[in-house]
Every structure is written in structure tokens, then in C-alpha cells.
Image: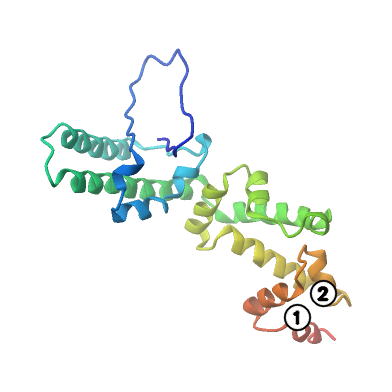
């Protein structure tokens, strides 16, 4: 099951003759002045790539098709003052099922979340060890997702499901781990460490550090003196 946003192109190959498709196309104005318009922006799978499609089990496929059938029946019914609200409710039901099924897919795709976290740590360690932080600044979610072969949105949602934290939070935690390592093994100041980690504004590292350790960088460093 694929999702696309306005302005994106989708298609298939000419030799795909042995199957049929269900396609739901929604005019942006359909949700105009409706609460669902704002909620729709929160469904991350509209920004996923084609390789991050939703793979449905047979039971899940039956559920999705049943909602499609309800939508089709409503479309073919007499239009009245209730039609739009009913259609919006059915579309919301479909999208909520997709959220549930994607969470199932995240868990199955990485049965052991530590594998993903180890890969993330490796990417971030390589970034710092090769002095990329000095040249390009602190690592970004885009850099992390590129090297893990996920779209930023898919990585964000998968991490949120598996660990309850965002990709940015994982990056910040790794930065603080590196800062703690530097403070405990070198005589570098937090300012020098901040620049090594790609921060032009050292106080921001101090703020992150205190949020995680409940200590200021100097206070943490003094425990090793």
C-alpha cells in the first residue's frame, strides 16, 4: 500500500496485467475548514518513499478493502448534507488503520531494536571520528537517514514506535555521550569539545548536557579530577 502527496508522481510497468488496484484520490479542498485537514498533516507515511510501502497481511488487506468498499458505496449514494462528514470519517478510519498496520511493520522489520540503534551509533561514531562535525556541523536527521537507507519520516516514526524517542533525540544523546567521554578522558574545555562536536554555540551543548546528566559539564568533569 503506497501513499503519495500532491506534486508526486506514481506509476507502474506495462506488463502488470494480472492484478487490480484500489486508488483513493482526494482533492486538497475536500478537507477545507474541517478538523481532519490539520490531522492529515500528522500522518508521516505521506512522506515515505516507495520502498517504505505498507506490506499488508491477508487479514489487514481485508480490513482495508472493506473501508474502500464503504467509501465507494458512499460515493455512489445520493449526496446530502451528511455525505462529506461521513466520507471524512471513513477516510480517517482508513488512515488510522494504516497507522496501526505500520506500527506492526516497524516491529517486524526490526525484531530487535538494538540492531537499529547499533547501526545508528556506528553512523554517528563514523561522523565524529572522521571530523565531519568540524567541517559540516553537528549531524542531522537527514544525514542519519541517508546512511541508514530510510526516509527521514520513516526513520522518525520507526524510532518513535520502537524506543519512544525521535531521531533528533538519539543524535543529541550520542552527542552528550561523546561529550562525557571527552570530559572524562581529556583536559579539553566544554567550549573546545562543543566545536569538535559541530556546535558553533557552546552553551547549547551545556544545556543538552545538563538535561541528560543533571550536571553542568564542569561539574561532571570535576568528578574525574
**Side (left or right) of 209 relative to 158:** right
Q: Residues within 10 Å of mark 1 (few under 14, many from 20)?
A: many
State whether residue 110 appears in this view: no
Q: Residue at point 33% right, 38% down?
A: 27
Tag nearer the camera, 1 or 2:
2
Q: Residues within 10 Å of mark 2 (few under 14, many from 20)?
A: some
Residue 143 drawn above or below residue 26:
below
Q: Measuring from the top left, give residue 148's x and y in whole percent.
A: 64, 45
Q: Measuring from the top left, give residue 208's x and y in whole percent.
A: 66, 74
Q: Which is nearer the eye, 66 or 208?
A: 208
Residue 39: image quadrant is bottom left
Q: Measuring from the top left, give residue 184's x and y in whole percent.
A: 81, 77
- Which label belongs to residue 217? 1
Which of the two labelled residues, at mark 1 and mark 2, occupies the earlier sequence position? 2
In the picture, which quadrant includes the C terminus?
A: bottom right
Which residue is situated farthest in the right direction here?
A: 187
- Which label belongs to residue 191? 2
Q: Secondary structure at mark 2?
A: helix
Q: Secondary structure at mark 1?
A: helix
The CA distance from mark 1 to mark 2 is 10 Å
Which colour scheme appears in the figure?
rainbow
Q: Residue at point 33% right, 50% down?
A: 96
Residue 166: image quadrant is bottom right
Q: Which is nearer the eye, 199 or 101?
A: 199
Residue 160 drawn above or below residue 10:
below
Q: Which is nearer the eye, 60 or 84?
A: 84
Amino acid at each position: 500500500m503506497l501513499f503519495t502527496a500532491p506534486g508526486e508522481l506514481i506509476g507502474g510497468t506495462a506488463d502488470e496485467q494480472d492484478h487490480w488496484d484500489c486508488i483513493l484520490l482526494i482533492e486538497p479542498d475536500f478537507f477545507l475548514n474541517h478538523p481532519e485537514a490539520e490531522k492529515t498533516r500528522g500522518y508521516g507515511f505521506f512522506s515515505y518513499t516507495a520502498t517504505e510501502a505498507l506490506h499488508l497481511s491477508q487479514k489487514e488487506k481485508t480490513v482495508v478493502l472493506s473501508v474502500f468498499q464503504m467509501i465507494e458505496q458512499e460515493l455512489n449514494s445520493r449526496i446530502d448534507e451528511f455525505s462529506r462528514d461521513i466520507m471524512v470519517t471513513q477516510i480517517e478510519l482508513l488512515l488510522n488503520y494504516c497507522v496501526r498496520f505500520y506500527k506492526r511493520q516497524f516491529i517486524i522489520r526490526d525484531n530487535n531494536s538494538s540492531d537499529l540503534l547499533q547501526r545508528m551509533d556506528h553512523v554517528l561514531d563514523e561522523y565524529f571520528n572522521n571530523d565531519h562535525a568540524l567541517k559540516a556541523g553537528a549531524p542531522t536527521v537527514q544525514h542519519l537517514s541517508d546512511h541508514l537507507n530510510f526516509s527521514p519520516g520513516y526513520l522518525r516514526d520507526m524510532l518513535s514506535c520502537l524506543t519512544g524517542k525521535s531521531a533528533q533525540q538519539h543524535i543529541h544523546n550520542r552527542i552528550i555521550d561523546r561529550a562525557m567521554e571527552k570530559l572524562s578522558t581529556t583536559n579539553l574545555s566544554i567550549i573546545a569539545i562543543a566545536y569538535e562536536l559541530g556546535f558553533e554555540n557552546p552553551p547549547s551543548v551545556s544545556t543538552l548536557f545538563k538535561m541528560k546528566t543533571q550536571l553542568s559539564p564542569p561539574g561532571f568533569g570535576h568528578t574525574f579530577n
